[in-house]
């Protein structure tokens, strides 16, 4: 295995070339941000280099995604520069010294956290979680107002919404009690995904099981629900 670095515009791409008995030239971007090309010994290096140059936009895009995922999954210290996900977008956290009340403000793509002790990670985490819950009440209430008219004519009464953190589900339905429970983490997803989960739970008031009638009902009211579900499930282990 040999390592090579080539210039692609203003970007440098370093890749490892592995010679082995394969029919095709294979190019992979691995989770550790390494780029690996495997090719038969009969394939000239210049062909490999041209392949890497041709795939440069794809390689750079995937490397950026890996870096972004690392930022999102790193151990939280809630310091300036960390990435916070909100409504399907990445926001940069900026931490400020609070002279009066501790609070969080949303300014463009910046989440400004005002805290009295910037070294207190648990306090900062608590403020972020409280803010998420407050925003979730607003966003989920608005989602219910958008989606409920779709099911109202089917005799489904408007339910109450409970918000809490759940590890394995985006939402649940207590149809006998007229209540749906939504995962606070859903606030990190786009409004399209939020609307899908709300409709999914409302549909359970009419069809309690995930059967053909249930999914037919979803398709009639939200034809693109599978696209939204795919976005929702991307890179998560949480189900609806």
Image: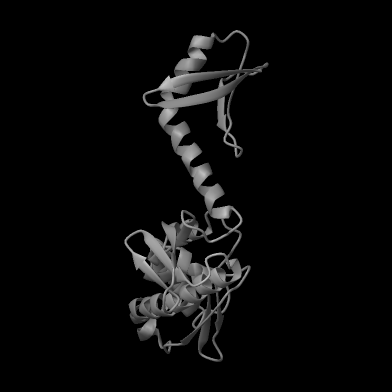
Nearest the eye: 234 or 230: 234
Taking 132 as reference, is 42 above or below it?
above
Q: How many marks?
A: 0
**Residue 138 image position (x, y, % from top left):** 39, 79
Q: Residue at x 47, y 60 (%)?
A: 84
For the N terminus, which image quadrant?
top right
Q: Is residue 117 left or right of residue 106?
A: right
**Residue 53 image position (x, y, % from top left):** 43, 21
Q: Residue at x 43, y 20 (%)?
A: 7
For the C terminus, which image quadrant?
bottom right
Taking 138 as reference, is 178 above or below it?
below
Nearest the eye: 107 or 46: 107
Taking 159 as reference, is 12 above or below it?
above
**Residue 128 image position (x, y, % from top left):** 50, 70
Q: Residue at x 56, y 48 (%)?
A: 70
**Residue 63 image position (x, y, % from top left):** 50, 37
Q: Is residue 216 visible?
A: no
Q: Is residue 80 left or right of residue 35?
A: left
For residue 89, which quarter of the picture?
Answer: bottom left
For residue 35, which quarter of the picture?
Answer: top right
Nearest the eye: 161 or 188: 188
Furthest residue in direction bottom, as rendered: 177
Taking 200 as reference, is 93 above or below it?
above
Colour mapping used in the image: one colour
Furthest residue in direction front, as rendered: 99
Nearest the eye: 36 or 77: 77
């Amino acid at each position: 295995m040999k390592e090579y670095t080539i210039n692609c515009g203003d970007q440098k791409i370093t890749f490892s070339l592995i010679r082995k008995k394969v029919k095709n030239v294979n190019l992979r971007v691995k989770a550790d941000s390494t780029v690996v090309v495997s090719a038969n010994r009969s394939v000239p290096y210049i062909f490999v280099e041209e392949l890497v140059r041709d795939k440069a936009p794809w390689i750079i895009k995937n490397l950026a995604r890996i870096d972004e995922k690392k930022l999102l999954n790193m151990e939280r210290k809630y310091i300036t520069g960390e990435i916070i996900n909100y409504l399907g977008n990445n926001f940069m956290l900026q931490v400020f010294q609070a002279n009066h009340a501790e609070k969080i403000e949303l300014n463009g793509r910046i989440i400004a956290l005002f805290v009295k002790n910037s070294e207190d990670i648990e306090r900062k985490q608590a403020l972020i979680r409280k803010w998420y819950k407050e925003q979730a009440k607003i966003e989920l209430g608005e989602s219910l107002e958008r989606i409920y008219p779709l099911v109202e004519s089917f005799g489904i009464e408007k339910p109450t919404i409970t918000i809490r953190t759940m590890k394995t589900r985006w939402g649940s339905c207590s149809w006998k009690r007229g209540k749906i429970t939504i995962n606070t983490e859903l606030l990190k997803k786009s409004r399209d995904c939020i609307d899908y989960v709300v409709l999914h739970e409302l549909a359970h008031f009419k069809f309690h099981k995930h059967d053909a009638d249930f999914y037919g009902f979803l398709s009639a009211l939200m034809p693109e629900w599978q696209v939204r579900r795919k976005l929702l499930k991307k890179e998560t282990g949480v189900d609806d």
